[in-house]
Image: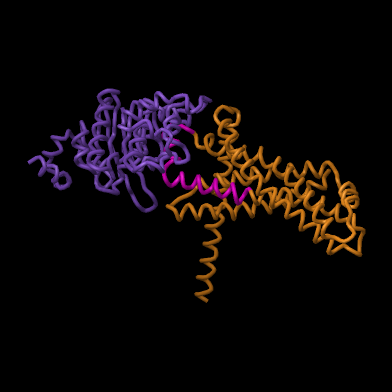
Chain colours: A purple, B orange
């Protein structure tokens, strides 16, 4: 379980998070919606300890991230996968080496070539041909890089996956593929996911629950059906397009 | 009067900000050293990457280091010949050549080449990794960027620069001798060898190598430290690289001055 407790975060004079309370239950997929620049990515970066809160805490499996020792934090991070918005692949390493790095313990001296079987399996999960294994990220398209980023995030078989705008910049077909992948890892691997997105289609497609982050606080937190029926004007304005699509 | 006061306030404010920034950097650099020493007892975490870095720094810089060292030696023997001919015995050229190359030119020219070729590249690479969230990705995977990126580079610099300095010393002396013979009237090989032997002490050679090790660590550490603080986009990466090169140049010259008394100590 991941629990955000009264989280505050500012960058200089800009107050981004203003007391966020949110619980993500084991095995569920939470879609975190919100307008651009409201701090959705900032929020999930706190879960993995990439940012320190000004106040409040994030509890992952009972471990306080704000007070964790470096060793505790490393342990927690081994159970968390993070899909970065721009993939954040290591551009001096090939695709295979990127996957190897995520799979291997840092004390291992096993060469990257030793885990090709597992890497091929990971690539097939994200609909990529094994021939990309020896390519560098700069030789891949944006969509392919994103899918390698997903493969790298699931390589260490995490219990939790944090998806930062997974479908942004993808064509509709690849966006659908990623949506299916999010649902598949939830179903098959039992992974708990937080999907940060401003793509309503993705949110309603993959989310067991949807939370709306607005002006630094959680404005709504409900099932997709509950969100559609929510009478709050802000929520209504945000999901109007989905409502019209449904109609 | 009011203008003078406002000017003084601005000046004091600037000085205060600069001092705070400098102290913050000293603190952060100290923390990075602590992290480096924490990683060192676990060689499995960095040994493979260290060997790769040593190869990149050493083998790929060797040609340029030797070329610049040869030019340094050649200039020294010619300049010494031009200034001392007629006033002092010619074998002095050999002594000046050995003293200059072993204590200054060999280590310093090697360091400058490494700074331009390796230090700038490290700073740009790490800054680029920082701004494209690759450093965050390392953290997210439970990897320690210090073990993965910093230690291999600093250790690589420590291991590779001393042998490069030895080779640069040799090349500088050889080129100095060859050009001296050709360019200075009356200078013989025997003069050069006599002059070199007259000056030579084992400590000078050890000093040269030690200086190389210190410079190697300084270049790579500063490049890593500055690189990991990179912010902004492409412009930020460029700014970070410039900062790394300027800082390293200053630190190398300061270290050169601070290390000079060590030569006299033995």
Q: Who is closer to the viewer here, A34 or A98?
A: A98
Write down the region rendered in magenta: B114-143
Residue B252, image x and y in percent? 67, 51
Q: Is residue B174 visible?
A: yes
Residue B62, image x and y in percent? 66, 44
Residue at figure coordinates x 74%, y 55% from the top left:
B72
Residue B86, image x and y in percent? 91, 64
Asked if the stretch drawn in magenta spans residue B70, the answer is no
Q: Magenta residues: mostly which secondary structure?
A: helix
Which of the 4 quarters of the picture holds residue B50?
A: top right
The answer to whether residue B236 is above or below residue B170 is below
Residue at figure coordinates x 60%, y 44% from the top left:
B220
Which of the 4 quarters of the picture holds residue A76?
A: top left
Side of A150 relative to B41 (left or right): left
Residue at figure coordinates x 43%, y 39% from the top left:
A136
Q: Who is closer to the viewer here, B177 or B139?
A: B177
- Looking at the image, the residue that sits furthest to the bottom is B1
Q: Who is closer to the viewer here, A104 or A97?
A: A97
């Amino acid at each position: 379980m991941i629990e955000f407790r009264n989280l505050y975060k500012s960058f200089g004079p800009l107050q981004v998070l203003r007391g966020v309370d949110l619980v993500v239950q084991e095995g569920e997929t939470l879609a975190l919606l919100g307008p651009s620049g409201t701090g959705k990515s900032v929020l999930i970066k706190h879960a993995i300890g990439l940012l320190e809160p000004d106040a409040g805490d994030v509890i992952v499996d009972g471990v306080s991230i704000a007070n964790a020792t470096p060793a505790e934090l490393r342990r927690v991070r081994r159970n968390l996968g993070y899909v970065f918005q721009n993939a954040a692949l290591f551009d001096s390493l090939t695709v295979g080496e990127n996957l190897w790095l995520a799979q291997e313990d840092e004390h291992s001296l096993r060469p990257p070539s030793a885990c090709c079987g597992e890497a091929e399996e990971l690539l097939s999960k994200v609909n990529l041909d094994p021939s990309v294994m020896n390519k560098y990220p700069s030789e891949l398209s944006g969509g392919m890089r994103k899918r390698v980023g997903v493969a790298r995030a699931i390589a260490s078989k995490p219990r939790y996956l944090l998806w930062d705008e997974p479908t942004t910049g993808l064509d509709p077909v690849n966006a659908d593929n990623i949506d299916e992948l999010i649902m598949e890892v939830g179903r098959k691997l039992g992974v708990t996911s937080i999907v940060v997105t401003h793509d309503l289609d993705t949110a309603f497609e993959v989310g067991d629950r949807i939370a709306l982050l607005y002006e630094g606080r959680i404005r709504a937190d409900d099932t997709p059906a509950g969100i559609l029926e929510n009478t709050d004007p802000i929520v209504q304005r945000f999901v109007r397009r989905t409502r019209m699509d449904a109609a | 009067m009011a203008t003078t006061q406002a000017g003084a306030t601005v000046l004091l404010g600037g000085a205060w900000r600069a001092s705070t920034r400098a102290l913050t950097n000293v603190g952060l650099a100290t923390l990075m050293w602590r992290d480096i020493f924490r990683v060192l007892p676990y060689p499995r975490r960095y040994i493979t990457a260290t060997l790769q870095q040593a190869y990149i720094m050493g083998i790929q810089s060797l040609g340029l280091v030797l070329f610049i060292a040869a030019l340094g030696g050649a200039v020294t023997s010619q300049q010494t010949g031009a200034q001392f001919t007629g006033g002092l015995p010619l074998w002095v050229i050999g002594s000046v050549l050995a003293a200059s190359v072993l204590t200054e030119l060999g280590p310093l020219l090697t360091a400058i080449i490494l700074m331009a070729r390796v230090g700038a590249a490290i700073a740009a690479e790490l800054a680029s990794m920082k701004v494209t969230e690759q450093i965050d990705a390392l953290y997210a995977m439970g990897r320690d960027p210090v073990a993965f990126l910093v230690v291999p580079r600093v250790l690589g610099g420590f291991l590779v620069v001393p042998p490069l300095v030895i080779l640069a010393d040799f090349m500088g002396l050889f080129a100095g001798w060859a050009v001296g013979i050709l360019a200075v009237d009356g200078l013989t090989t025997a003069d050069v060898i006599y002059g070199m032997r007259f000056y030579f002490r084992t400590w000078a050679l050890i000093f040269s190598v030690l200086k190389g090790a210190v410079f190697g660590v300084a270049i790579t550490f500063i490049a890593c430290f500055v690189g990991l603080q990179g912010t902004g986009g492409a412009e930020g990466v460029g700014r970070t690289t410039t900062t790394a090169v300027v800082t390293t140049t200053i630190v190398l010259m300061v270290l050169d001055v601070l290390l000079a008394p060590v030569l006299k100590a033995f």
